[in-house]
Image (cartoon, helix red, strand yellow):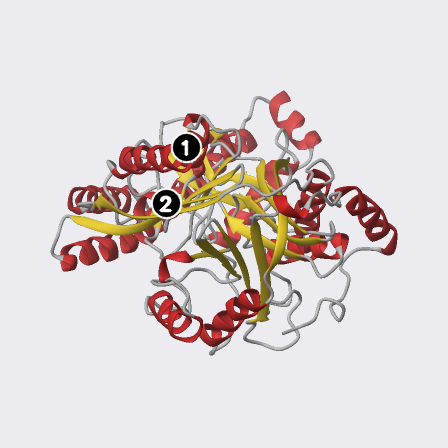
């Protein structure tokens, strides 16, 4: 494991000094030992596949014990456990079995959340994750807790674009953006950072759990493995707090939330600025969150049955639309080279594109319009060429999403049943209340759950204890074939109401 003291500071000395001073404000004043009803320990192991990453990928573990209950929050800097990425579906049951055998850990205590960064973990990620949990178990100390929220709205954007024709498209690297003139709005973001802090009995910080919704997929210009935005933010927090404190990023409902400027073509990819901003926002919030005498610990484990989708009708409709678009293609006078040249001329000089103004005016004076007719013909040729390009972009988007729909339709048919069972959990640590779900839940669902809760500090963790792909709203599913969230989905639209209802019941039971 890489020690805290050996890691490179990511911030300039002046900024780091300011954050260190701010962190001193965060230190709780020790109270009576009798009030310390919870114990906690932390552990961390480097799980980066390649050497010398820009920001290492970690398996971090936070064990909390109290009231006869144990909860272990494991955060992995990986894309997911099961289905996509290097970690397969055997990982979670194998990890549970290994920890039960080696330290007697109740399998239900594990809450394994993936940041959804796209780096590749090492081959022995299972063993290293187990080691991190064992380190946490071996280092249990009495703790006090503090709960609060931070705010960050500068580093993320909803990737779903609302169009004039009522559809919603999403922003992906796999296909082009729609024309700006066709876009009328974007979906919501969730700027709230849910924070749980745990301090040792003497006031020194031990751990910070921060829940935030955003794909950490900005990447790095070198193309190497990286923990991405949230790797940088965690290190900023740890550098600021000192004392070996460990930061645990818990991914929220970021299914349709991209990093800001995700499609930027004019700057090298660099996750550090956005990560620093998120980290600083957490540190600022921690300055207002005092760690008090710990409250109770409560954990709920449940199975939720959800409806599977039937994509057959959507697939047929998209195939028909694709055929229509292909038939809409027309022969064009131009090729790509001549289009670029004409487009440049007519953009730079829309009034006199073909020659100088004197020639246009002289021609007009003698009653001729040769250049005007040429311009009219060239503009029509450019419109025809652009029409083909726009049709091609639509065909590309449909084909990309059709592949996803066909794959998930085949998986649902292969399953042999119309439902899918998933693991959901509820966790309460004092005033910190969190429910978990194993899919890429979109932002609006997380906002709905938090708004419906009567408890101020309610948070939602997606990407947890499994992976069932994207989970869009019932309304979003009506935009067939336009967005990845709708196309890469195993679930039927009724899933949203089912999960939001179960989440409300979990929260109510945690608060009893």
Q: Residues within 10 Å of mark 1 (few under 14, many from 20)?
A: many
Give me the disc on residue 301.
none
Give me the disc on residue 449.
1
Q: CA distance from mark 2 to mark 1?
A: 19 Å
Residue at point 36% right, 45% down?
A: 485
Give the mark, 2 or 1, whose residue is nearer the N terminus: 1
Q: Is residue 270 visible?
A: no
Image location (x, y in percent) of residue 275: 66, 51
Q: Is residue 6 visible?
A: yes
Q: Quadrant of the rendered structure where residue 111 is?
A: bottom left
Q: Which residue, given by chain and number where applicable, does mark 2 sit on?
A: 485
Residue at point 53% right, 36% down?
A: 431
Image location (x, y in percent) of residue 165: 36, 27
Determine whether 236 is above or below 329 in the image. below
Residue at point 20% right, 45% down?
A: 309
Q: Secondary structure at mark 2?
A: helix
């Amino acid at each position: 494991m890489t020690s805290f003291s050996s890691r490179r500071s990511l911030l300039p000395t002046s900024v780091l000094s300011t954050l260190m001073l701010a962190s001193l404000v965060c230190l709780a004043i020790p109270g009576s030992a009798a009030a310390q009803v919870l114990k906690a320990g932390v552990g961390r192991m480097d799980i980066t596949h390649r050497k010398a990453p820009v920001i290492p990928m970690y398996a971090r573990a936070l064990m909390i014990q109290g009231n006869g209950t144990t909860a272990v929050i494991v955060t992995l800097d990986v894309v997911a456990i099961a289905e996509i990425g290097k970690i397969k579906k055997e990982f979670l049951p194998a990890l549970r079995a290994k920890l039960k055998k080696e330290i007697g850990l109740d399998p239900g205590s594990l809450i394994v959340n993936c940041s959804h960064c796209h780096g590749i973990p090492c081959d022995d990620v299972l063993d290293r994750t187990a080691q991190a949990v064992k380190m946490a178990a071996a280092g249990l100390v009495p703790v006090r807790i503090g709960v609060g929220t931070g705010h960050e709205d500068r580093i993320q954007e909803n990737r779903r674009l609302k169009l004039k024709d009522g559809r919603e498209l999403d922003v992906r690297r796999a296909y082009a953006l729609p024309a700006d003139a066709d876009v009328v709005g974007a979906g919501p973001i969730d700027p709230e950072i849910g924070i749980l802090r745990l301090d040792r009995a003497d006031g020194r910080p031990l751990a910070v759990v921060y829940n935030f919704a955003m794909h950490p997929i900005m990447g790095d210009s070198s193309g190497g493995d990286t923990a991405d935005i949230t790797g940088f933010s965690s290190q900023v927090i740890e550098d600021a707090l000192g004392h070996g404190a460990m930061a645990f990023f818990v991914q929220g409902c970021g299914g349709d939330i991209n990093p800001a400027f995700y499609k930027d073509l004019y700057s090298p990819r660099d996750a550090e600025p956005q990560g620093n901003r998120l980290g600083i926002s957490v540190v600022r919030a921690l300055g207002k969150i005092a760690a008090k005498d710990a409250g109770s610990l409560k954990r709920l484990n449940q199975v939720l049955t959800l409806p599977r989708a039937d994509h057959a009708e959507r697939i047929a409709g998209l195939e028909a639309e694709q055929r229509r678009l292909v038939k809409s293609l027309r022969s064009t006078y131009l090729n790509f080279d001549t289009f670029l040249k004409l487009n440049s001329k007519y953009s730079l000089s829309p009034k006199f594109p073909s020659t100088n103004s004197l020639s246009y005016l002289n021609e007009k004076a003698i009653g001729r319009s040769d250049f005007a007719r040429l311009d009219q013909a060239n503009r029509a040729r450019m419109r025809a060429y652009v029409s083909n390009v726009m049709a091609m972009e639509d065909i590309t988007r449909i084909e990309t999403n059709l592949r996803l729909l066909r794959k998930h339709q085949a998986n649902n048919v292969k399953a042999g049943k119309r439902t899918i069972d998933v693991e959901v959990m509820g966790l309460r640590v004092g005033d910190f209340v969190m429910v978990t779900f194993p899919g890429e839940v979109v932002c609006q669902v997380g906002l709905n759950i938090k708004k419906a809760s009567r408890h101020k500090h309610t948070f939602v963790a997606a990407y947890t204890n499994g992976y069932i792909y994207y989970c869009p709203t019932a309304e979003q599913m009506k935009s067939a074939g336009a967005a990845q969230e709708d196309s890469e989905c195993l679930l039927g639209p009724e899933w949203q109401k089912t999960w939001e209802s179960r989440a409300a019941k979990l929260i109510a039971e945690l608060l009893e």
